[in-house]
Image (cartoon, grey):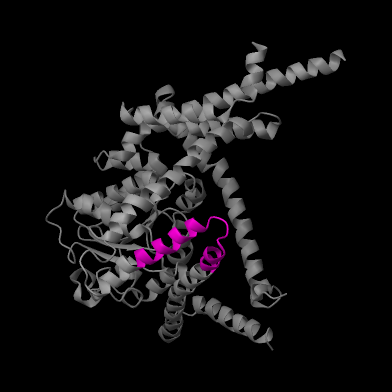
Amino acid sequence: MRREIPIAICFLVGISFILEYFIPHEDVLSIFETIRQWAIIVIAFAYVLGIANLVRINSHVIQRKGRDWPYKIILVVSLFFMITVGIIFDIFGIRLGGIGEGTIFGWVYFHAQYPLQATMFSLLAFFIASAAFRAFRIRTFQASLLAVTAILVMIGRVPVGESLWADFPDFIEWIMNVPQLAGKRAIMIGAALGAISTALKVLTGLERTYLGGE
Amino acid sequence: MRKILEKLESLDRRIIFIFIGLSIAIPLLFPVYTDFSVTAPVEGFYDAIEELSPGSKVLVSCDYDPGSMPELFPMNVAVFHHLFSRGHKIIVMQLWATGTLLAERAMNEVLQEFPDKRYGEDYVNLGFKEGREVVMVSMGTSIPKTFPTDAQGTKLEEIPLMQGVTNFDDITILMNISGGLPGTKEWVLQVQSRYGVKLGSGCTAVSAPEFYPYVQSGQLVGLLGGMKGAAEYEKLVQRPGTAQRGMDAQSVSHIVVFLFILIGNIAYFSVKGKKKRLKVSR
Protein backbone atom coordinates (compact mmCIF):
# COMPACT_ATOMS: atom_id res chain seq x y z
CA MET A 1 0.00 0.00 0.00
CA ARG A 2 3.02 2.30 0.44
CA ARG A 3 3.20 2.75 -3.29
CA GLU A 4 -0.44 2.25 -4.25
CA ILE A 5 -1.85 5.08 -2.12
CA PRO A 6 0.44 7.81 -3.53
CA ILE A 7 -0.26 6.56 -7.07
CA ALA A 8 -4.01 6.67 -6.39
CA ILE A 9 -3.76 10.21 -4.95
CA CYS A 10 -1.71 11.30 -7.95
CA PHE A 11 -4.29 9.84 -10.34
CA LEU A 12 -7.33 11.35 -8.61
CA VAL A 13 -5.85 14.82 -8.14
CA GLY A 14 -4.35 14.90 -11.64
CA ILE A 15 -7.56 13.84 -13.36
CA SER A 16 -9.54 16.33 -11.26
CA PHE A 17 -7.36 19.25 -12.31
CA ILE A 18 -7.62 18.19 -15.97
CA LEU A 19 -11.42 18.05 -15.69
CA GLU A 20 -11.46 21.42 -13.89
CA TYR A 21 -10.09 23.03 -17.06
CA PHE A 22 -13.23 21.95 -18.91
CA ILE A 23 -15.79 22.67 -16.15
CA PRO A 24 -15.93 26.45 -15.64
CA HIS A 25 -18.72 26.25 -13.04
CA GLU A 26 -18.22 28.62 -10.11
CA ASP A 27 -18.63 25.98 -7.38
CA VAL A 28 -16.11 23.65 -9.06
CA LEU A 29 -13.65 26.51 -9.57
CA SER A 30 -13.85 27.56 -5.91
CA ILE A 31 -12.96 24.02 -4.73
CA PHE A 32 -9.88 23.93 -6.91
CA GLU A 33 -8.99 27.50 -6.02
CA THR A 34 -8.84 26.40 -2.37
CA ILE A 35 -6.58 23.48 -3.31
CA ARG A 36 -4.34 25.90 -5.23
CA GLN A 37 -4.06 28.12 -2.14
CA TRP A 38 -2.98 25.01 -0.18
CA ALA A 39 -0.36 24.33 -2.86
CA ILE A 40 1.02 27.89 -2.57
CA ILE A 41 1.33 27.46 1.21
CA VAL A 42 3.04 24.07 0.84
CA ILE A 43 5.45 25.53 -1.73
CA ALA A 44 6.27 28.37 0.67
CA PHE A 45 7.03 25.82 3.41
CA ALA A 46 9.43 24.16 0.99
CA TYR A 47 11.68 27.18 1.63
CA VAL A 48 11.79 26.21 5.33
CA LEU A 49 12.69 22.67 4.33
CA GLY A 50 15.33 23.99 1.94
CA ILE A 51 16.92 26.18 4.61
CA ALA A 52 16.96 23.31 7.13
CA ASN A 53 18.56 20.99 4.58
CA LEU A 54 21.15 23.57 3.59
CA VAL A 55 22.12 24.20 7.23
CA ARG A 56 22.25 20.47 7.97
CA ILE A 57 24.48 19.57 5.02
CA ASN A 58 26.85 22.51 5.45
CA SER A 59 27.06 22.04 9.24
CA HIS A 60 28.36 18.50 8.70
CA VAL A 61 31.04 19.79 6.30
CA ILE A 62 32.04 22.56 8.72
CA GLN A 63 32.20 20.12 11.68
CA ARG A 64 34.41 17.69 9.78
CA LYS A 65 36.41 20.59 8.22
CA GLY A 66 35.65 19.10 4.83
CA ARG A 67 36.36 20.62 1.42
CA ASP A 68 35.91 24.43 1.26
CA TRP A 69 34.61 24.52 4.86
CA PRO A 70 35.42 28.25 5.37
CA TYR A 71 33.13 29.09 2.44
CA LYS A 72 30.37 26.99 4.03
CA ILE A 73 30.62 29.15 7.15
CA ILE A 74 30.26 32.28 5.02
CA LEU A 75 27.28 30.69 3.27
CA VAL A 76 25.42 29.83 6.49
CA VAL A 77 26.28 33.14 8.19
CA SER A 78 25.14 35.11 5.09
CA LEU A 79 21.90 33.14 4.97
CA PHE A 80 20.98 33.90 8.58
CA PHE A 81 22.16 37.49 8.30
CA MET A 82 19.83 38.16 5.35
CA ILE A 83 16.92 36.38 7.11
CA THR A 84 17.56 38.47 10.21
CA VAL A 85 17.73 41.87 8.50
CA GLY A 86 15.02 41.08 5.95
CA ILE A 87 12.40 39.37 8.09
CA ILE A 88 13.14 39.58 11.82
CA PHE A 89 14.13 43.26 11.78
CA ASP A 90 10.92 43.98 9.86
CA ILE A 91 8.72 42.02 12.28
CA PHE A 92 10.12 43.92 15.28
CA GLY A 93 10.10 47.26 13.47
CA ILE A 94 13.85 47.69 13.77
CA ARG A 95 15.21 50.55 11.70
CA LEU A 96 16.46 49.63 8.22
CA GLY A 97 14.68 46.26 8.45
CA GLY A 98 12.65 44.80 5.60
CA ILE A 99 13.55 44.06 1.99
CA GLY A 100 12.96 47.32 0.11
CA GLU A 101 15.41 49.86 -1.25
CA GLY A 102 17.03 51.82 1.58
CA THR A 103 17.13 48.81 3.91
CA ILE A 104 20.19 46.76 4.93
CA PHE A 105 18.82 43.87 2.85
CA GLY A 106 18.50 46.15 -0.17
CA TRP A 107 22.00 47.52 0.33
CA VAL A 108 23.54 44.01 0.48
CA TYR A 109 21.45 42.96 -2.53
CA PHE A 110 22.63 45.85 -4.71
CA HIS A 111 26.25 45.82 -3.49
CA ALA A 112 26.83 42.06 -3.27
CA GLN A 113 24.32 39.84 -5.06
CA TYR A 114 23.67 42.13 -8.00
CA PRO A 115 27.34 42.67 -9.04
CA LEU A 116 28.27 39.04 -8.33
CA GLN A 117 25.36 37.57 -10.29
CA ALA A 118 25.78 40.03 -13.16
CA THR A 119 29.51 39.21 -13.31
CA MET A 120 28.90 35.46 -13.44
CA PHE A 121 26.45 35.94 -16.28
CA SER A 122 28.81 38.33 -18.08
CA LEU A 123 31.47 35.62 -18.23
CA LEU A 124 29.23 33.87 -20.73
CA ALA A 125 30.04 36.50 -23.35
CA PHE A 126 33.72 35.53 -23.28
CA PHE A 127 33.11 31.79 -23.26
CA ILE A 128 30.58 32.05 -26.10
CA ALA A 129 33.11 33.94 -28.23
CA SER A 130 35.77 31.32 -27.51
CA ALA A 131 33.31 28.48 -28.20
CA ALA A 132 32.17 30.13 -31.43
CA PHE A 133 35.78 30.37 -32.61
CA ARG A 134 36.29 26.65 -32.06
CA ALA A 135 32.85 25.25 -32.88
CA PHE A 136 31.80 27.14 -36.01
CA ARG A 137 34.03 25.19 -38.38
CA ILE A 138 32.51 24.51 -41.78
CA ARG A 139 33.15 20.77 -41.82
CA THR A 140 29.84 19.61 -43.33
CA PHE A 141 26.93 21.13 -45.27
CA GLN A 142 24.79 21.33 -42.10
CA ALA A 143 27.65 22.95 -40.18
CA SER A 144 28.10 25.53 -42.94
CA LEU A 145 24.36 26.27 -42.91
CA LEU A 146 24.49 26.78 -39.14
CA ALA A 147 27.58 28.98 -39.30
CA VAL A 148 26.28 31.17 -42.15
CA THR A 149 22.86 31.63 -40.52
CA ALA A 150 24.43 32.41 -37.14
CA ILE A 151 26.74 35.01 -38.66
CA LEU A 152 23.90 36.62 -40.63
CA VAL A 153 21.65 36.86 -37.55
CA MET A 154 24.53 38.12 -35.38
CA ILE A 155 25.37 40.93 -37.79
CA GLY A 156 21.79 41.67 -38.83
CA ARG A 157 20.47 42.05 -35.30
CA VAL A 158 22.81 44.92 -34.41
CA PRO A 159 22.82 48.51 -35.79
CA VAL A 160 26.04 47.96 -37.75
CA GLY A 161 24.24 45.36 -39.88
CA GLU A 162 21.64 47.93 -40.89
CA SER A 163 24.47 50.36 -41.71
CA LEU A 164 25.92 47.83 -44.14
CA TRP A 165 22.59 47.00 -45.81
CA ALA A 166 19.36 48.88 -45.08
CA ASP A 167 17.16 45.77 -45.55
CA PHE A 168 19.31 43.56 -43.31
CA PRO A 169 16.87 43.78 -40.33
CA ASP A 170 13.93 42.81 -42.57
CA PHE A 171 15.90 39.85 -43.93
CA ILE A 172 16.71 38.70 -40.40
CA GLU A 173 13.04 39.08 -39.41
CA TRP A 174 12.20 36.82 -42.35
CA ILE A 175 14.67 34.22 -41.07
CA MET A 176 13.12 34.45 -37.60
CA ASN A 177 9.51 34.41 -38.85
CA VAL A 178 9.78 31.67 -41.48
CA PRO A 179 12.49 28.98 -41.27
CA GLN A 180 13.31 29.52 -37.60
CA LEU A 181 9.67 29.71 -36.57
CA ALA A 182 8.79 26.58 -38.53
CA GLY A 183 11.54 24.56 -36.89
CA LYS A 184 10.78 25.95 -33.44
CA ARG A 185 7.06 25.26 -33.77
CA ALA A 186 7.76 21.67 -34.83
CA ILE A 187 10.01 21.19 -31.80
CA MET A 188 7.41 22.76 -29.47
CA ILE A 189 4.63 20.51 -30.78
CA GLY A 190 6.85 17.45 -30.45
CA ALA A 191 7.87 18.43 -26.92
CA ALA A 192 4.23 19.08 -25.98
CA LEU A 193 3.15 15.65 -27.25
CA GLY A 194 6.00 14.10 -25.27
CA ALA A 195 4.95 16.02 -22.16
CA ILE A 196 1.33 14.85 -22.55
CA SER A 197 2.53 11.27 -22.92
CA THR A 198 4.76 11.49 -19.85
CA ALA A 199 2.00 13.17 -17.83
CA LEU A 200 -0.47 10.42 -18.72
CA LYS A 201 2.10 7.79 -17.73
CA VAL A 202 2.63 9.50 -14.37
CA LEU A 203 -1.11 9.89 -13.75
CA THR A 204 -1.90 6.26 -14.61
CA GLY A 205 0.98 4.97 -12.47
CA LEU A 206 3.03 3.57 -15.36
CA GLU A 207 5.82 6.07 -14.55
CA ARG A 208 6.80 5.82 -10.88
CA THR A 209 10.27 7.33 -10.70
CA TYR A 210 8.90 10.32 -8.74
CA LEU A 211 8.14 7.96 -5.83
CA GLY A 212 11.81 7.03 -5.49
CA GLY A 213 13.06 4.04 -3.56
CA GLU A 214 13.20 1.65 -6.55
CA MET B 1 52.19 32.54 -43.55
CA ARG B 2 51.33 28.89 -43.03
CA LYS B 3 52.90 28.90 -39.56
CA ILE B 4 50.81 31.93 -38.64
CA LEU B 5 47.65 30.13 -39.79
CA GLU B 6 48.61 27.01 -37.82
CA LYS B 7 49.06 29.12 -34.70
CA LEU B 8 45.73 30.83 -35.35
CA GLU B 9 43.98 27.45 -35.59
CA SER B 10 44.85 26.77 -31.96
CA LEU B 11 44.66 30.37 -30.75
CA ASP B 12 44.94 30.87 -26.99
CA ARG B 13 41.46 31.79 -25.80
CA ARG B 14 42.84 34.51 -23.55
CA ILE B 15 43.58 36.52 -26.69
CA ILE B 16 39.92 36.10 -27.70
CA PHE B 17 38.87 37.23 -24.20
CA ILE B 18 41.03 40.38 -24.48
CA PHE B 19 39.51 41.33 -27.83
CA ILE B 20 35.97 40.70 -26.59
CA GLY B 21 36.64 42.73 -23.45
CA LEU B 22 38.00 45.69 -25.43
CA SER B 23 35.25 45.47 -28.07
CA ILE B 24 32.63 45.83 -25.32
CA ALA B 25 34.37 48.28 -22.98
CA ILE B 26 35.53 50.91 -25.50
CA PRO B 27 32.12 51.47 -27.20
CA LEU B 28 30.43 51.53 -23.79
CA LEU B 29 32.76 54.28 -22.64
CA PHE B 30 32.66 56.18 -25.95
CA PRO B 31 29.26 55.45 -27.57
CA VAL B 32 28.53 56.67 -31.08
CA TYR B 33 24.78 55.92 -31.00
CA THR B 34 24.48 54.29 -34.43
CA ASP B 35 20.93 54.63 -35.72
CA PHE B 36 18.66 51.62 -36.18
CA SER B 37 15.09 50.87 -37.24
CA VAL B 38 12.32 49.31 -35.20
CA THR B 39 11.17 45.76 -35.97
CA ALA B 40 7.59 44.51 -36.15
CA PRO B 41 7.43 42.57 -32.83
CA VAL B 42 8.59 45.66 -30.91
CA GLU B 43 6.11 47.84 -32.81
CA GLY B 44 3.37 45.39 -31.84
CA PHE B 45 4.32 45.72 -28.16
CA TYR B 46 4.33 49.51 -28.40
CA ASP B 47 1.06 49.71 -30.36
CA ALA B 48 -0.68 47.44 -27.85
CA ILE B 49 -0.09 50.06 -25.13
CA GLU B 50 -0.89 52.96 -27.46
CA GLU B 51 -4.29 51.42 -28.22
CA LEU B 52 -5.31 51.25 -24.55
CA SER B 53 -7.89 53.74 -23.33
CA PRO B 54 -6.49 56.15 -20.68
CA GLY B 55 -6.67 54.87 -17.13
CA SER B 56 -6.40 51.20 -18.15
CA LYS B 57 -5.16 48.81 -15.49
CA VAL B 58 -2.03 47.03 -16.67
CA LEU B 59 -0.44 44.11 -14.82
CA VAL B 60 3.35 44.05 -15.17
CA SER B 61 5.09 40.88 -13.99
CA CYS B 62 8.81 41.49 -13.45
CA ASP B 63 10.34 38.01 -13.51
CA TYR B 64 14.10 38.46 -13.82
CA ASP B 65 17.33 38.65 -11.85
CA PRO B 66 20.59 40.65 -11.90
CA GLY B 67 22.06 38.23 -14.46
CA SER B 68 19.58 39.34 -17.12
CA MET B 69 19.39 42.92 -15.90
CA PRO B 70 21.37 44.54 -18.75
CA GLU B 71 18.74 43.32 -21.22
CA LEU B 72 15.59 43.44 -19.13
CA PHE B 73 15.98 46.38 -16.72
CA PRO B 74 15.96 48.97 -19.55
CA MET B 75 12.77 47.32 -20.88
CA ASN B 76 11.22 47.40 -17.43
CA VAL B 77 11.96 51.11 -17.03
CA ALA B 78 10.74 51.91 -20.55
CA VAL B 79 7.48 49.98 -20.00
CA PHE B 80 6.76 51.85 -16.74
CA HIS B 81 7.61 55.15 -18.45
CA HIS B 82 5.36 54.39 -21.43
CA LEU B 83 2.42 53.36 -19.24
CA PHE B 84 2.67 56.40 -16.94
CA SER B 85 3.09 58.79 -19.87
CA ARG B 86 -0.22 57.54 -21.33
CA GLY B 87 -2.03 57.83 -17.98
CA HIS B 88 -2.42 54.12 -17.30
CA LYS B 89 -2.44 52.41 -13.91
CA ILE B 90 0.27 49.87 -13.13
CA ILE B 91 -0.06 46.74 -10.99
CA VAL B 92 3.39 45.28 -10.43
CA MET B 93 4.11 41.74 -9.28
CA GLN B 94 7.01 39.30 -9.31
CA LEU B 95 7.30 35.55 -9.63
CA TRP B 96 11.08 35.66 -9.10
CA ALA B 97 12.34 36.53 -5.60
CA THR B 98 15.30 38.37 -7.15
CA GLY B 99 12.94 40.57 -9.17
CA THR B 100 11.41 42.41 -6.21
CA LEU B 101 14.15 44.98 -5.64
CA LEU B 102 14.83 45.36 -9.38
CA ALA B 103 11.16 46.15 -10.08
CA GLU B 104 11.18 48.61 -7.17
CA ARG B 105 14.31 50.31 -8.51
CA ALA B 106 12.80 50.55 -12.00
CA MET B 107 9.65 52.12 -10.57
CA ASN B 108 11.63 54.58 -8.41
CA GLU B 109 13.65 55.62 -11.46
CA VAL B 110 10.50 56.37 -13.47
CA LEU B 111 8.72 58.10 -10.59
CA GLN B 112 11.40 60.79 -10.69
CA GLU B 113 9.92 61.79 -14.07
CA PHE B 114 6.32 61.49 -12.82
CA PRO B 115 6.31 62.97 -9.29
CA ASP B 116 2.51 63.37 -9.38
CA LYS B 117 1.90 59.59 -9.42
CA ARG B 118 0.51 58.26 -6.14
CA TYR B 119 1.02 54.82 -4.65
CA GLY B 120 -2.29 53.02 -4.34
CA GLU B 121 -3.98 55.23 -6.92
CA ASP B 122 -1.68 55.16 -9.96
CA TYR B 123 0.47 52.14 -9.17
CA VAL B 124 0.75 49.32 -6.67
CA ASN B 125 3.32 46.63 -5.98
CA LEU B 126 1.79 43.29 -5.06
CA GLY B 127 5.25 41.86 -4.37
CA PHE B 128 6.68 38.40 -4.85
CA LYS B 129 4.67 35.20 -4.55
CA GLU B 130 6.24 31.73 -4.80
CA GLY B 131 4.27 29.09 -6.67
CA ARG B 132 5.05 29.75 -10.33
CA GLU B 133 2.24 28.45 -12.53
CA VAL B 134 0.00 27.79 -9.51
CA VAL B 135 0.08 31.52 -8.75
CA MET B 136 -0.69 32.37 -12.38
CA VAL B 137 -3.73 30.11 -12.53
CA SER B 138 -4.84 31.15 -9.06
CA MET B 139 -4.89 34.79 -10.18
CA GLY B 140 -7.27 33.78 -12.95
CA THR B 141 -9.85 32.91 -10.30
CA SER B 142 -9.07 35.56 -7.70
CA ILE B 143 -6.22 38.07 -7.52
CA PRO B 144 -7.13 39.25 -3.97
CA LYS B 145 -7.06 35.63 -2.71
CA THR B 146 -3.66 35.05 -4.33
CA PHE B 147 -2.25 38.38 -3.09
CA PRO B 148 -4.22 39.23 0.08
CA THR B 149 -1.89 42.17 0.71
CA ASP B 150 0.53 44.25 -1.31
CA ALA B 151 4.30 44.16 -0.80
CA GLN B 152 4.00 46.58 2.13
CA GLY B 153 1.35 44.51 3.92
CA THR B 154 -1.67 46.70 3.08
CA LYS B 155 -4.84 44.71 2.41
CA LEU B 156 -5.90 44.85 -1.23
CA GLU B 157 -9.43 45.99 -0.37
CA GLU B 158 -7.91 49.12 1.21
CA ILE B 159 -6.02 50.06 -1.98
CA PRO B 160 -8.11 52.24 -4.32
CA LEU B 161 -6.41 50.96 -7.49
CA MET B 162 -7.33 47.36 -6.64
CA GLN B 163 -11.03 48.13 -6.13
CA GLY B 164 -12.99 46.04 -8.60
CA VAL B 165 -9.97 43.99 -9.62
CA THR B 166 -11.00 40.35 -9.09
CA ASN B 167 -9.23 38.44 -11.82
CA PHE B 168 -7.74 38.81 -15.30
CA ASP B 169 -11.09 40.03 -16.69
CA ASP B 170 -10.44 43.28 -14.81
CA ILE B 171 -6.93 43.67 -16.27
CA THR B 172 -6.70 45.28 -19.70
CA ILE B 173 -3.34 43.84 -20.63
CA LEU B 174 -0.54 41.86 -19.02
CA MET B 175 3.08 42.72 -19.67
CA ASN B 176 5.73 40.19 -18.68
CA ILE B 177 9.44 40.97 -18.33
CA SER B 178 10.87 37.48 -18.37
CA GLY B 179 14.36 36.19 -17.55
CA GLY B 180 13.51 32.48 -17.77
CA LEU B 181 11.31 30.04 -15.87
CA PRO B 182 8.64 30.93 -14.80
CA GLY B 183 8.16 33.49 -17.52
CA THR B 184 6.55 34.25 -20.84
CA LYS B 185 6.02 30.64 -21.90
CA GLU B 186 4.20 29.84 -18.66
CA TRP B 187 2.09 33.01 -18.91
CA VAL B 188 1.08 31.98 -22.45
CA LEU B 189 0.34 28.38 -21.49
CA GLN B 190 -1.45 28.98 -18.20
CA VAL B 191 -3.01 32.43 -18.55
CA GLN B 192 -3.27 33.70 -22.13
CA SER B 193 -4.64 30.45 -23.56
CA ARG B 194 -6.95 29.82 -20.60
CA TYR B 195 -8.28 33.28 -19.77
CA GLY B 196 -7.74 35.06 -23.10
CA VAL B 197 -5.95 38.05 -21.54
CA LYS B 198 -3.82 40.20 -23.85
CA LEU B 199 -0.14 39.47 -23.21
CA GLY B 200 3.06 41.23 -24.24
CA SER B 201 6.55 40.03 -23.46
CA GLY B 202 10.03 41.38 -22.94
CA CYS B 203 12.63 38.64 -22.76
CA THR B 204 16.32 37.87 -23.12
CA ALA B 205 17.74 37.61 -26.64
CA VAL B 206 18.45 33.91 -26.19
CA SER B 207 14.76 33.23 -25.36
CA ALA B 208 13.24 35.46 -28.04
CA PRO B 209 13.33 32.93 -30.94
CA GLU B 210 11.26 30.54 -28.82
CA PHE B 211 8.43 33.10 -28.58
CA TYR B 212 8.16 34.04 -32.26
CA PRO B 213 5.50 31.34 -32.81
CA TYR B 214 3.40 32.98 -30.10
CA VAL B 215 3.74 36.38 -31.80
CA GLN B 216 2.73 34.92 -35.13
CA SER B 217 -0.29 33.13 -33.67
CA GLY B 218 -1.40 36.30 -31.87
CA GLN B 219 -0.95 34.87 -28.38
CA LEU B 220 1.61 37.61 -27.79
CA VAL B 221 0.69 41.11 -28.90
CA GLY B 222 4.38 41.99 -29.17
CA LEU B 223 7.86 40.93 -28.18
CA LEU B 224 10.92 42.82 -26.99
CA GLY B 225 13.88 40.53 -27.63
CA GLY B 226 17.05 41.26 -25.71
CA MET B 227 18.94 44.50 -25.51
CA LYS B 228 18.16 45.32 -29.17
CA GLY B 229 14.45 45.01 -28.46
CA ALA B 230 14.86 47.21 -25.41
CA ALA B 231 16.77 49.79 -27.46
CA GLU B 232 14.09 49.82 -30.17
CA TYR B 233 11.41 50.28 -27.52
CA GLU B 234 13.38 53.11 -25.86
CA LYS B 235 13.49 54.76 -29.29
CA LEU B 236 9.72 54.44 -29.72
CA VAL B 237 8.90 55.84 -26.27
CA GLN B 238 11.56 58.55 -26.80
CA ARG B 239 13.40 57.76 -23.59
CA PRO B 240 17.04 56.92 -24.43
CA GLY B 241 18.53 54.63 -21.82
CA THR B 242 21.20 52.03 -21.17
CA ALA B 243 19.92 49.74 -23.92
CA GLN B 244 20.56 52.28 -26.66
CA ARG B 245 23.93 53.03 -25.11
CA GLY B 246 24.80 49.33 -25.23
CA MET B 247 24.01 48.93 -28.94
CA ASP B 248 27.44 50.11 -30.13
CA ALA B 249 29.14 47.66 -27.77
CA GLN B 250 26.91 44.88 -29.07
CA SER B 251 27.65 45.85 -32.70
CA VAL B 252 31.42 45.88 -32.25
CA SER B 253 31.53 42.67 -30.22
CA HIS B 254 29.40 40.84 -32.80
CA ILE B 255 31.79 41.98 -35.55
CA VAL B 256 34.72 40.73 -33.48
CA VAL B 257 33.08 37.33 -32.97
CA PHE B 258 32.37 37.14 -36.71
CA LEU B 259 36.03 37.94 -37.50
CA PHE B 260 37.21 35.23 -35.10
CA ILE B 261 34.90 32.70 -36.75
CA LEU B 262 36.27 33.75 -40.15
CA ILE B 263 39.88 33.51 -38.99
CA GLY B 264 39.18 30.14 -37.38
CA ASN B 265 37.75 28.74 -40.60
CA ILE B 266 40.53 30.13 -42.80
CA ALA B 267 43.13 28.62 -40.46
CA TYR B 268 41.21 25.33 -40.27
CA PHE B 269 41.01 24.91 -44.06
CA SER B 270 44.62 25.92 -44.48
CA VAL B 271 45.85 23.36 -41.93
CA LYS B 272 43.45 20.75 -43.31
CA GLY B 273 44.81 21.35 -46.83
CA LYS B 274 48.40 20.98 -45.62
CA LYS B 275 47.59 17.68 -43.85
CA LYS B 276 45.93 16.40 -47.03
CA ARG B 277 48.95 17.31 -49.15
CA LEU B 278 51.29 15.61 -46.66
CA LYS B 279 49.14 12.48 -46.74
CA VAL B 280 49.13 12.38 -50.56
CA SER B 281 52.90 12.89 -50.80
CA ARG B 282 53.47 9.86 -48.52
Q: Position of residue A14 (x, y in %)?
A: 57, 78
For the view shown, which residue lies furthest in the left direction? Answer: B116
Q: Residue at horizontal 68%, vertical 85%? A: A4
Q: Give residue A91's quadrant in the image.
A: bottom left
Query: What span is in magenta?
Result: A57-83
Q: Is A113 left or right of A132, judged from the image as shown? A: left
Reply above or below: B190 against A144: below
Q: Position of residue A55 (x, y in %)?
A: 48, 69
For the view shown, which residue lies furthest in the right direction? Answer: B282
Q: Position of residue A127 (x, y in %)?
A: 54, 38
Q: Magenta stretch containing residue A122, yes or no?
A: no
The one nearer the camera, B119 or A171, is B119
Task: Name the quarter where the N terminus of chain B is drawn.
Answer: top right
Q: Residue at horizontal 69%, vertical 89%? A: A1
User: In this rendering, does residue B240 appear at all?
Assistant: yes
Q: Main secondary structure of the magenta part?
A: helix
Q: Position of residue A193 (x, y in %)?
A: 63, 62
For the view shown, which residue lies furthest in the top direction? Answer: B1
User: In this rendering, does residue B61 appear at all?
Assistant: no
Q: Give residue A104's quadrant in the image.
A: bottom left
The one nearer the camera, A144 or A170, is A144
Q: Is B205 left or right of A114, judged from the image as shown? A: right
Q: Magenta stretch containing residue A75, yes or no?
A: yes
Q: Is B20 left or right of A1, judged from the image as shown? A: left
Q: Total number of numbered labels?
A: 0
Task: Name the quarter where the C terminus of chain B is drawn.
Answer: top right
Q: Is B279 left or right of B29, judged from the image as shown? A: right
The one nearer the camera, B174 or B15, is B15
The one nearer the camera, A30 or B100, is B100
